[in-house]
Image (cartoon, rainbow, N blue to C red):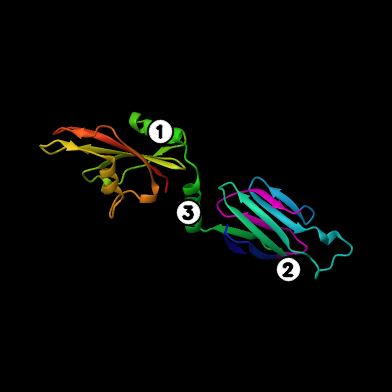
Amino acid sequence: MTHPLDEKRALEVRVSQTGLTRIKVEDDRILQVFGMAGEYVLEVDEAQGQIFIRPTDIGDPSFSRSSSKPISLTLTTEEGHTQDLRLIPTSQAPEALILQVNTDLAREIKREKQASAPLFREEVEGLIEACQEGRIPLGYKEIPLNLTTLQEPYLLVREIQGQKLRGLTYRVQNNTQEVLVLSEPEFARRSLGEGGFIKPHTLVALLISKKTLTPGEGTDVYVVTRAN
């Protein structure tokens, strides 16, 4: 039997009273199991990242099929997912329980966790410094650019991304015959407004290397946003 993994509610599932029920998370591995000691017998398949479980009361002389109690479990996975389970022992043959991750829901939960995660000034400043020096910090990777982003006046020339933050480098070139004055508020207005290229709730910091450009002169703008 297959059920979608839902971190926001407990999943109630009927399992065998007498045999081992295999529990697996698709495309992931079970890391830890929490429950009331004595309610169940647990076997772990570390190679496959799955578990096998059955009620303990079947060895009790007073055990009756009608009195088997539900088993409450909480699973956590290597990918950071959590699932509460309420297993109802019934008179049935053992059947595997496969939990499928809802990618849309998982993405939304990840966004919520990232949005609430504290950001330290040191890591933001360190990311801007890495962008200025053209480095890729530990835990980050360079993202291939989409040609549609290469639009004036701010040309995205580099993007690096980690679990929590993105570092964006924009190139600004003064192709006019007049002095061009740049400002953070103007950049924010153009990038965050309707049709802008940065989502308003993700902007963390920005730095303009040089704010006054003579004709033909260029500069870089460094932007830090929360990862999507």
Residue highlighted by disc 2? 92
Q: Residues within 10 Å of mark 2 (few under 14, many from 20)?
A: few
Dividing the picture into quarters, in which one does residue 95 lie?
bottom right
As drawn, 131 above or below 153 = above
Report the amino acid beneath label 1.
Glu
Q: Which residue is at the front of the view, 130 or 143?
A: 130
Q: Give the Cα separation between the discs numbered 3 and 2.
A: 36 Å
Q: Which quarter of the rendering shows the N terminus?
A: bottom right
**Residue 115 rendering spot, x and y as whole percentages:** 47, 48
Judged left or right of residue 81, residue 193 is: left
Q: Which residue is at the front of the view, 19 or 81?
A: 81
Residue highlighted by disc 3? 107
Tell me the SS state at disc 2: loop
Judged left or right of residue 202, residue 98 is: right
Task: Give the residue displayed 61% in from the left and 56% down from the top.
Answer: 83
Residue highlighted by disc 1? 125
* Magenta range: 15-36
Report the amino acid beneath label 3.
Arg
Q: Residues within 10 Å of mark 3 (few under 14, many from 20)?
A: few
Q: Give the Cα separation between the discs numbered 1 and 2.
A: 59 Å
Furthest residue toward left: 177
Report the amino acid beneath label 2.
Gln
**Residue 26 rendering spot, x and y as whole percentages:** 57, 55
Tell me the SS state at disc 3: helix
Judged left or right of residue 67, residue 213 is: left
